[in-house]
Amino acid sequence: MRTTVDGIGGERAEARDSEIYVRDLYLNYVIKRGRKKASRSQPALEGVNIDVRKGEFLSLVGSSGCGKSTFLYILAGLIRRSSGDVVIGGKDVVGPALDRGIVMQGYALFPWRTIIRNVEFGLEMKGIPKKRGVSSRKTALRWWDLAAMRGDTPMSCPGA
Ligand SMILES: Nc1ncnc2c1ncn2[C@@H]1O[C@H](COP(=O)(O)OP(=O)(O)OP(=O)(O)O)[C@@H](O)[C@H]1O
Ligand SMILES: [Mg+2]
């Protein structure tokens, strides 16, 4: 995806004027092919610039594979950009945080995390130490009857 969207009014914004400020954003996925074979780089975002100001509503529309989800994952702090600036609410995005949420189209699980690490995600985001979260984790696993699958990834669970 390569796109430039300036705020309503057309003038180019500075980071401090925008709720979401993205400049020259690049993301290359590194695809590893076995241990010995060289890895390949798959560009997904090439120089994206976007300004969203307070009260604005932005829809991203584009063909499949153009990089919409990749862009949103970077804003959510779930994947790390290759280069560029991403500033939300005046703060550089360096990882997930409670001021941002993402609602998945399909399922709301992180496929690369085990069941227990998915359960722990909310606690991690709130900065709750592992020891203090023990009873919440146990309750959640019991509630959804997932204790036996705590070490599995979501896709390996029945019904996935
Ligand atoms: N984890 C990944 N590893 C390697 N390449 C990836 C990965 N995720 C996405 N890609 C590639 O990056 C590009 C952008 O994918 P992305 O999923 O962001 O597109 P999208 O616009 O959300 O598509 P769709 O409309 O189908 O959801 C595509 O070429 C895709 O194949
Ligand atoms: Mg997508």
Image (tube, rainbow, N blue to C red):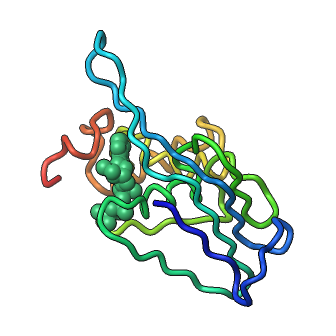
Near-viewer residue (3 or 61) = 3
Residue plotted at (26% across, 51% down) = 145
Observer able to see residue 99? yes
Relative to 69, is 5 on the left or the right? right
Residue lying farthest top?
36
Q: Count how many numbered circles sit on residues in the image.
A: 0
Near-viewer residue (25 or 134) = 25
Q: Is residue 132 above or below residue 88?
A: above
Q: Is residue 72 above or below residue 128?
A: below
Residue 6 image position (x, y, % from top left): 68, 77
Residue plotted at (76% across, 52% down) = 92
Residue 52 image position (x, y, % from top left): 68, 76
Quarter-of-image position of residue 81:
top right
Near-viewer residue (111 or 24) = 24
Relative to 154, is 116 on the left or the right? right
Relative to 20, is 58 on the left or the right? left
Quarter-of-image position of residue 7:
bottom right
Residue lying farthest left?
158
Residue 128 image position (x, y, % from top left): 65, 45
Residue plotted at (52% across, 52% down) = 46
Observer able to see residue 108? no
Q: Is residue 4 above or below residue 108?
A: below
Residue plotted at (71% across, 52% down) = 85
